Image (cartoon, helix red, strand yellow):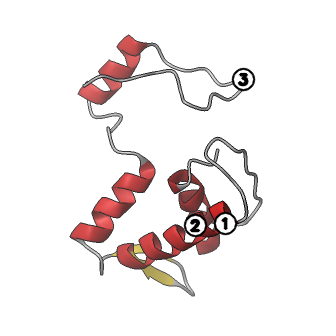
């Protein structure tokens, strides 16, 4: 597998691994070749009813999590955010934080 360690949208102050280290991480299973969005889509397709997020007051299946994060990703694009744009949000340990993070990952918003 060809792994690029140069991110498409590099962040100042972040150290990126060498190509050799990246290959090692993939080979040993520390990293996976799927992006976060791809992994969620895979789980939503293979186990849509399986619980993905469970809190004392909320429960989302993989299918639901994929759908709501898709909707937010499209909404962010509709607002004019584009891949590589930077986003920041401050939220607690709630379902909405996970949805926002996944939506940004799907929309390639850093």
Q: Which residue is mark 3?
A: 13
Q: Which residue is mark 2?
A: 74
Secondary element type, mark 2: helix
Residue sitting at x 32%, y 39%: 32
* Alpha carbon separation for disc pair 3 and 2: 29 Å
Q: Does residue 59 sit above or below 11 in this rendering? A: below
Residue sitting at x 55%, y 21%: 16
Residue 10, image x and y in percent? 63, 28
**How many residues crowd mark 1 within 10 Å: few (<14), some (14–19), many (20+)?**
few
- In this view, the residue in front, 104 or 81, is 81
Residue sitting at x 64%, y 44%: 110
Residue sitting at x 56%, y 54%: 107
Residue 71, image x and y in percent? 54, 73
Q: Earlier in the sequence, mark 3 or mark 2?
A: 3
Secondary element type, mark 3: loop
Report whether residue 32 is seen: yes
Q: Does residue 105 sit above or below 30 in this rendering? A: below
* Alpha carbon separation for disc pair 3 and 1: 30 Å
- In this view, the residue in front, 70 or 91, is 70
Q: Earlier in the sequence, mark 3 or mark 1?
A: 3
Left or right: residue 84 versus residue 47 is: right
Q: Does residue 58 sit above or below 11 in this rendering? A: below
Q: Which residue is mark 1?
A: 78
């Amino acid at each position: 597998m060809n792994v690029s360690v140069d991110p498409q949208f590099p962040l100042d102050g972040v150290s990126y691994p060498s190509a050799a280290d990246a290959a090692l991480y993939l080979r040993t299973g520390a990293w996976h070749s799927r992006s976060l969005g791809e992994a969620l889509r895979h789980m939503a397709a293979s186990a849509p009813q399986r619980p993905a997020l469970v809190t004392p007051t909320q429960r989302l299946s993989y299918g639901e999590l994929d759908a709501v994060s898709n909707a937010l990703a499209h909404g962010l694009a509709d607002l004019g955010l584009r891949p590589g744009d930077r986003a920041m949000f401050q939220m607690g340990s709630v379902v909405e934080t996970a949805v926002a993070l996944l939506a940004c990952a799907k929309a390639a918003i850093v």
